[in-house]
Image: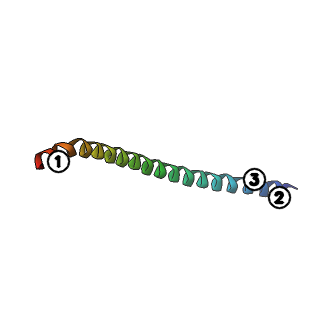
Amino acid sequence: HYNYRIQDLIDLKILQIENQAVFIQIHKQATREQKLKDKLMHMQTWLSELHYRMAKYRPPLKIAAG
């Protein structure tokens, strides 16, 4: 009986360590994804600003050309 309890404690410790490892992996992955999302949002913002500026300056260019 005593050995069985020791084994339970060992298993519990192993599971705790593995659980912690998996948690860390998920956390790293989430952090990476968040960074990618931030980068994507930044790029999209930059893109819309660029579109807006190009649209704003397009008519004067046409007028200048005409």
Amino acid on which disc 1 is placed: Lys
Q: Nearer the viewer, residue 4 or 28?
A: 28
| Nearest to viewer (mark 2 / mark 3) | 3
| Nearest to viewer (mark 1 / mark 2) | 1
Q: Is label 2 in contact with label 3 (beta carbons under 8 Å)?
A: no
Amino acid on which disc 2 is placed: Asn
Picture disc at residue 11 = none
Sequence-first tag of 1 and 2: 2
Sequence-first tag of 2 and 3: 2
Q: Where does the image place residue 46, in percent across and percent down from the top left?
A: 31, 45
Q: Residue at x 59, y 55 (%)?
A: 21
Q: Where does the image place residue 63, in percent across and percent down from the top left?
A: 14, 44
For mark 1, what is the residue? 62
Sequence-first tag of 1 and 3: 3
Extreme front residue here? 66
Q: Where does the image place residue 14, in percent across and percent down from the top left?
A: 68, 57
Q: Residue at x 28, y 46 (%)?
A: 50
Secondary structure beneath label 3: helix
For mark 2, what is the residue? 3
Marks 2/3: CA distance?
10 Å
Q: Where does the image place residue 24, in percent across and percent down from the top left?
A: 55, 51
Q: Residue at x 69, y 55 (%)?
A: 15
Marks 1/2: CA distance?
87 Å
Marks 1/3: CA distance?
78 Å
| Nearest to viewer (mark 1 / mark 3) | 1
- Characterize the local packing of mark 3: few (<14), some (14-19) or many (20 or more) Cα atoms within 10 angstroms: few
Picture disc at residue 9 = 3
Q: Is residue 46 above or below residue 6?
A: above
Quadrant location of residue 53?
Answer: top left
